[in-house]
Image (cartoon, rainbow, N blue to C red):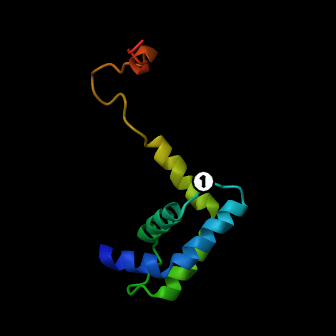
Amino acid sequence: MVNEQWSYWKMKLEPVIQSKVEEWKILGYEKISEKDVWECFMIKVEKSKERPEKIRSHWMVSELFSLKVNDYMNLVTVAAYKGPEWFHNEQPVDFRLNQFEDDSS
């Protein structure tokens, strides 16, 4: 699907996304946002082997409601492990604290 179509579906599915945000907040994940839920859903759709050829709204609603907070936490954990590559080049990384101090004093 084209990005415009996904934007359209995101707008149409906003009540479902908001419901999922509220559910996860009840479970103690206070900093979760609609953007987080949508990104988790999009990654799940990309990886889905059972994705229908023609995606319909009822399938998308079902997939959104079937998202679990563990799906989101797995994505966050993997992203943390894939974090910035500090040591990929040959130049040393400067971890000295004085580089962050204000020199105005």
Residue 30 percent coordinates (x, y): 65, 55
Q: Is residue 30 left or right of residue 43?
A: right
Please tell me how crowded label 1 is: few (under 14), some (14-19), or many (20+) other residues with Cα within 10 Å.
few
Judge whether 72 appears above or below 6 on screen.
above
The quadrant where residue 29 appears:
bottom right
Of the pair 10 and 72, the residue shown nearer to us: 10
Residue 9 percent coordinates (x, y): 42, 80
Q: Is residue 1 visible?
A: no
The quadrant where residue 45 appears:
bottom left
> Which residue appears at 35% of the width and 27% of the height?
87
State the quadrant of the N terminus: bottom left
> Which residue appears at 52% of the width and 87% of the height?
58
Of the pair 69 and 11, the residue shown nearer to us: 11
Q: Secondary structure at mark 1?
A: loop
Which residue is situated farthest in the left direction here? 90
Q: Is residue 65 left or right of residue 75?
A: right
Q: Is residue 45 left or right of residue 92?
A: right
Residue 72 percent coordinates (x, y): 56, 58
State the quadrant of the C terminus: top left
| Residue at image mark 1 | 31
Which residue is situated farthest in the front direction here? 105
Q: Identify which amino acid the numbered label 1 is placed on.
A: Lys
